[in-house]
């Protein structure tokens, strides 16, 4: 009756020096534990068992999406609509909405809303408040134009990514990272082009630690909700979610909210909607702010030039990152 939801890969090094995120859902989680058990079971039924030798891949995208729609979608047309998060006596700390997405090559399904679509629509709704602020953590920052366009109406966007000393592909002695020290420079290149009046990029720098946290935090400033949205000419001096902001949404899951997640990978995120004065919202505010204690401004991060061949190839190969 317990589930640990994480975007970590659970290899040995993830339990030693990695800053990652884990959400423990206990006592059945009001059905969430059974939901994810069924989701994994459905994926397994549409997968091939590895027997220690190469197997001929089969492709059954339509059957997988049909089966997954039965897991993700509810038959109840009023499911969740009648929940009142504004009642003062409510004991609800969050409403959890899971998502699922298969790569586009698997096709689309008429009733199964993709993770990308759900996240984009959520950001667009926040933008309508005129005071929405987005906080995004991803070790491999590479947002798509679809994502960036959804953010255009927000008051500000904070991206947090891995600095060079805390990057998963920094030079190491282990064999897996040999000749891959160019990878952090690729992500640095992709990150810096995002910076403008409404967008800040922060680099997590913590000696002997690797940054692998991923997730979204969506907040708004009630005091600015009725004002016309204007951009500030100066960059914020801190990445923190201040006490005057109301945190309304946070996510947990596998997605990096980048080109690879949107185009190539299977993804599932859990979207948590917080009522006012939620203790779980406060926990998530503190979680982001604790990561922010190791966040350096982009101007404080070492800049290395990407080689000409990589610069030329980057627009073509960015969906692999």
Image (cartoon, rainbow, N blue to C red):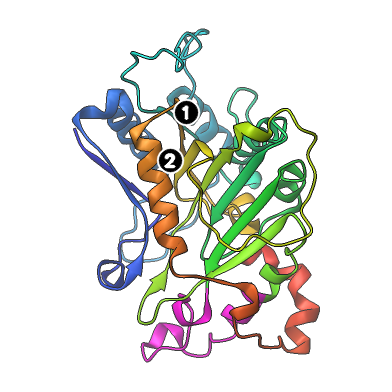
Give the position of the C terminus as an image quadrant.
Answer: bottom right
Q: Residue at x 80, y 44 (%)?
A: 230
Q: Residue at x 41, y 40 (%)?
A: 43
Q: Residue at x 33, y 37 (%)?
A: 41
Please check the rendered image and state whether residue 26 is part of the magenta-colored stretch, yes or no.
no
Tag 1 and tag 2, C-beta contact below 8 Å = yes
Residue to which mark 2 is pinned: 46
In front of the other: 43 or 259: 259
Which image quadrant is residue 5 in?
top left
Give the position of the N terminus as an image quadrant.
Answer: top left
In front of the other: 86 or 64: 86
Residue to which mark 1 is pinned: 67
Q: Residue at x 71, y 43 (%)?
A: 154
Note whether residue 45 is visible: no
In the picture, the disc for residue 160 is: none
Name the spot of residue 9 as percent of width and height, x first.
Answer: 36, 61
**Circle 2 Cα neighbour tier, 10 Å, few/some/many (<14 / 14–19 / ≥20):** some
Q: Which residues are magenta?
A: 163-188
- Left or right: 304 with respect to 316? left
> Is 33 rendered above or below residue 159?
above
């Amino acid at each position: 009756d317990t589930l640990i939801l994480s975007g970590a890969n659970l290899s040995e090094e993830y339990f030693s020096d990695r800053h990652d995120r884990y959400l423990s859902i206990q006592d059945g989680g009001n059905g969430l534990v059974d939901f994810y058990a069924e989701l994994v079971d459905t994926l397994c039924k549409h997968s091939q068992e590895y027997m220690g030798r190469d197997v001929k891949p089969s492709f059954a995208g339509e059957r997988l999406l049909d089966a997954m729609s039965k897991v993700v979608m509810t038959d109840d047309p009023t499911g969740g609509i009648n929940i009142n998060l504004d009642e003062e006596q409510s004991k609800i700390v969050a409403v959890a909405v899971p998502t699922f997405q298969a790569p586009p090559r698997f096709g689309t399904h008429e009733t199964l809303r993709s993770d990308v679509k759900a996240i984009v629509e959520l950001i667009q709704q926040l933008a309508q408040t005129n005071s929405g602020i987005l906080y995004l953590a991803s070790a491999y920052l590479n947002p798509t134009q679809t994502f960036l366009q959804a953010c255009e109406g927000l008051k500000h966007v904070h991206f947090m990514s891995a600095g060079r000393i805390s990057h998963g592909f920094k030079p190491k002695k282990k064999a897996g990272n040999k000749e891959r020290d160019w990878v952090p420079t690729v992500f640095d290149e992709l990150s810096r082009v995002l910076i403008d009046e409404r967008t800040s990029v922060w680099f997590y720098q913590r000696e002997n630690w690797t940054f692998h946290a991923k997730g979204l935090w969506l907040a708004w400033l009630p005091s600015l909700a009725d004002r016309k949205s204007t951009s500030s000419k100066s960059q914020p001096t801190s990445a923190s979610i201040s006490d005057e902001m109301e945190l309304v949404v946070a996510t947990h899951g596998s997605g990096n909210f980048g080109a690879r997640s949107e185009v190539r990978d299977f993804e599932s995120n859990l979207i948590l909607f917080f009522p006012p004065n939620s203790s779980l919202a406060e926990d998530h505010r503190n979680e982001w702010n604790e990561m922010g204690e190791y966040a350096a401004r982009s101007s404080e991060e070492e800049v290395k030039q990407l080689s000409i061949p990589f610069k030329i190839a980057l627009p073509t190969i960015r969906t692999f990152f």
